[in-house]
Image (tube, helix red, strand yellow):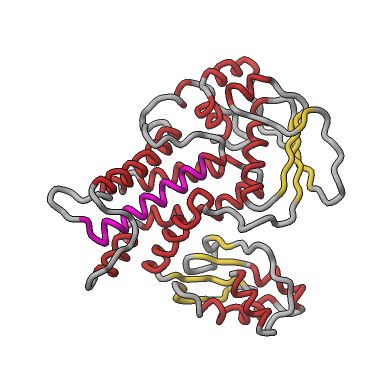
Amino acid sequence: MLHAVRRAVEAGELSVAVPTRAVVAPPGPGGCGDYATGIALQLARPAGQPPRRVAEVLRPHLLGVEGITDVVLTGPGFINIRLDGAASAVGVVGEVLRRGERYGYAEGPDGRVVRLHCPHDLRAVVVAEATARLLRSQGALVRVSAEGFEPAWASVLGAGVDAVGVAPAGPPAELSLDVRPVPVPASASGELLALGRDAGRWALLHPAAHDLPRTGEEHLVQRESNPLFRVRYAHARARAAARNAADLGFTAAPGPLGAGAEQDLLAALADHPRVLAALADHPRVLAAAADHRAPDRLARHLVTVADAALPFLPTVLPRGGEKPSAAHRARLALAEAVGAVLAGGLALLGIDAPDHL
């Protein structure tokens, strides 16, 4: 989307500063296609043109992009984009494998300076720290302070802040935000710390800020009823698929494709739309979680990725006397992309992603 704006500016069709970000999301009511954006409404005032006209200028620059099959304008100037399913699948997987665990990160600093301040409260500190990681992943410079801090929060949960005390006064350009989720009752703090780093952090970060976190041992059980277990298990299965494929002598690299093999590769990816949709949504989720100071959005998204991937992962490797084919390499690439997204997301939450579980 930003490339389309840049090309329109370079062609003299728009006179605006190219923004650092473009919000693209599934279409809302009245929209169509796979994704929609209101960037034309954002650019209308600085361009001195109606939003619909800005959208009309951008439309041909999008239609020329590989993998986009149609661009429809709706309402006052919303741009709706329809993708070629197979080509977009290859594009998503390729982008994840190219960026690895940094898939969904901003390309560089965006100039934002943010200060997060929280009370002397365990959950607030952990949420603020995870929020800082998310904001940094989206290009912001972040500093975290707390009114008080306990040594056990660092030694047990790996939590940390940049400063302790009253909220420091920052420069005018700094955005100052308070982080105040529903706290853990004092009577439950011991139970929470007994969960250890990974389960303890998940117990604090998975619920929305307005919900009271649960601190029981359900976060430790190694069963499908535990969302954290499903996320880490899906990651371990994805890593195991790559190890086992190497033992069988093949990788996710495309390699030489014979007649019809390219179509087999595209079909193998397109056969798993839930997995692909979850991976494609990851950058949007990271940006929204950072903007709304809501690491719970990322935690729930990781559960969505894991739940979509777990039925697919057993199909990655050849069975019986099968020989590795383009379709197997495509499924392996998808599995490796799942592993990268889950590992990267857990890292932003400060939670370990083991290769063996």
In the rendered image, the quadrant that contains the N terminus is: bottom right
The residue lying furthest to the left in this view is 321
User: Which residue is drawn at the image coordinates 41% and 52% (left, top)?
Assistant: 337
The part of the image, by quadrant, that contains residue 2 is: bottom right
Q: Is residue 236 left or right of residue 130?
A: left
105 or 61, nearer to the observer: 105
Percent of width and height locating residue 346 = 51, 39
Q: Nearer the viewer, residue 234 or 75?
A: 234
Q: Is residue 296 above or below residue 71?
A: above
Residue plotted at (37% across, 32% down): 357
Residue 150 drawn at (x, y percent)? 69, 20
Magenta highlight: main SS:
helix
Q: Position of residue 14 (x, y in %)?
A: 70, 80
Quadrant of the rendered image containing residue 91: bottom left
Tell me: 278 left or right of 223. Answer: right
- 114 over 108 or under it: above or below: above
- Say if the magenta span includes residue 307: no
Q: Residue at x 82, y 34 (%)?
A: 167
The spot of residue 33 in percent (x, y) is 47, 69
Residue 241 appears in which quarter of the rendering? top left
Q: Which residues are magenta?
A: 324-346
Residue at left offset 49%, top offset 34%:
352
Does the stretch in magenta take in 342? yes
Horizontal arrangement in the rendering, residue 90 relative to residue 76 (left or right):
left
